[in-house]
Amino acid sequence: MHSHHIVFRSHGGLDFDLNLIDLTLEEHEGDQGPHRNRERDLELKLNLQSRLQEIFHEETYTIEQISRLLGKSKRYFEKNFKRVPSAAGAYKREDIIRKLMGGKIYP
């Protein structure tokens, strides 16, 4: 099995469980895999975005809440959210999802 980042790290994707999926070699690198098939890549991204929208249903969250919801350390998100706008330590839902999606919200 190959661990695949749905939002590629080279495109701003982060290392958290929801952004990783296990694929067979053929599913990962074959003609129908996300690296060669834009439709499959988009399908995985839309699924991830939908799951994030379900998880982040409130208007704002603190780093502590983001950390708890995604199962990574507070320090990890502090480091990766430095450039995400916040007000008094609270991050807007849309900004969180956009950051986790590599800077892009998919239609």
Image: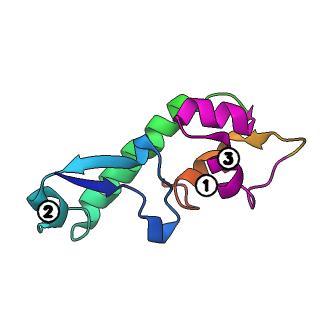
Rounded to the nearest whole Å, what is the CA distance between mark 1 and mark 2? 27 Å
The residue shown at (88%, 45%) is: 87
The tag on residue 61 is none
Residue 3 on image: x %, y %: 27, 53
Between circles 2 and 3, the one closer to the viewer is: 3
Residue that carries the numbered disc 2 in the rendered image: 32
Can residue 23 be found in the magenta stretch? Answer: no
Can residue 81 be found in the magenta stretch? Answer: yes
- The type of residue carrying mark 1 is Lys
- The type of residue carrying mark 3 is Arg
Residue 10 on image: x %, y %: 46, 71
Residue that carries the numbered disc 1 in the rendered image: 99
Q: Viewed as shown, does residue 50 lie left or right of 58?
A: left
Residue 106 on image: x %, y %: 48, 55
The tag on residue 75 is 3
Q: Is residue 58 above or below residue 45?
A: above
Rounded to the nearest whole Å, what is the CA distance between mark 2 and mark 3? 37 Å
